[in-house]
Image (cartoon, helix red, strand yellow):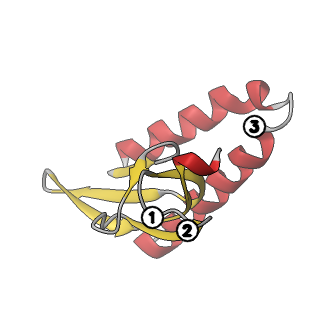
Amino acid sequence: MVNDKEQCQIINQLHTLANKLKSKDSYDAIDRNYTRILASLESMGYHVKDPLGESYDDTRLDCEASITGDGVDNLVIIEVIKPIVYKEIDGAKTLLQRAVVIVSDLKEGI
């Protein structure tokens, strides 16, 4: 049986693979498979969230961020290294993994 830590490692590898393929024409060919894998994970109680493009501030508890540029206001997530992973247990979502992200000030130009 796969434990939650191992499951997060699988999710992280899938996320990395999808990000690498998005920059290539071949991504469209595997998008359907990737979506099905995420649906299977959800049926097992895992919920994966990619916060790319979302705003960020230091009160956000679901992300660990590295800040690029000099700005500290109007921060936005410009890269997701690891996604947010929740597990639903008895109807309640529990945070298993905080996202690892890179953020930048909107003024810096994305």
Q: Is residue 32 above or below residue 72?
A: above
Identify the residue position indicated by label 3 in the image. 22
Task: Tell me which numbered mark, 2 or 3, is placed earlier along the sequence.
Answer: 3
**Extreme right residue here?**
25
- Which disc number belongs to residue 67? 2
Frontmost residue, 51 versus 21: 51
- Give the amino acid type for the residue marked by disc 2 in the picture: Ile
Q: Secondary structure at mark 3?
A: helix
Residue 75, horizontal then vertical, whole percent:
46, 54
Q: Is residue 46 above or below residue 96?
A: above
Do residues under tags 1 and 2 come within 8 Å of each other at their CB atoms? yes
Task: Tell me which numbered mark, 1 or 3, is placed earlier along the sequence.
Answer: 3
Q: Secondary structure at mark 1?
A: loop
The residue at 27%/67% (across/down) is: 59
Residue 102, horizontal then vertical, whole percent:
58, 62
- The residue carrying pointer 2 sits among few (fewer than 14), some (14 to 19) or many (20 or more) residues within 10 Å by Cα, namely some
Q: Secondary structure at mark 2?
A: strand
The residue at 56%/33% (across/down) is: 35
Q: CA distance from mark 1 to mark 2?
A: 8 Å
Horizontal side, residue 55 vs residue 6: left or right? left
Residue 21, horizontal then vertical, whole percent:
79, 41
Q: Is residue 57 something one can see in this rendering?
A: yes
- Give the amino acid type for the residue marked by disc 3 in the picture: Lys
The residue at 64%/26% (across/down) is: 32
**Which label sits in the foreground, 1 or 3?**
1
Task: Tell me which numbered mark, 1 or 2, is placed earlier along the sequence.
Answer: 2
Identify the residue position indicated by label 1 in the image. 72
Do residues under tags 1 and 3 come within 8 Å of each other at their CB atoms? no
**Which label sits in the foreground, 2 or 3?**
2
Horizontal side, residue 17 vs residue 47: left or right? right
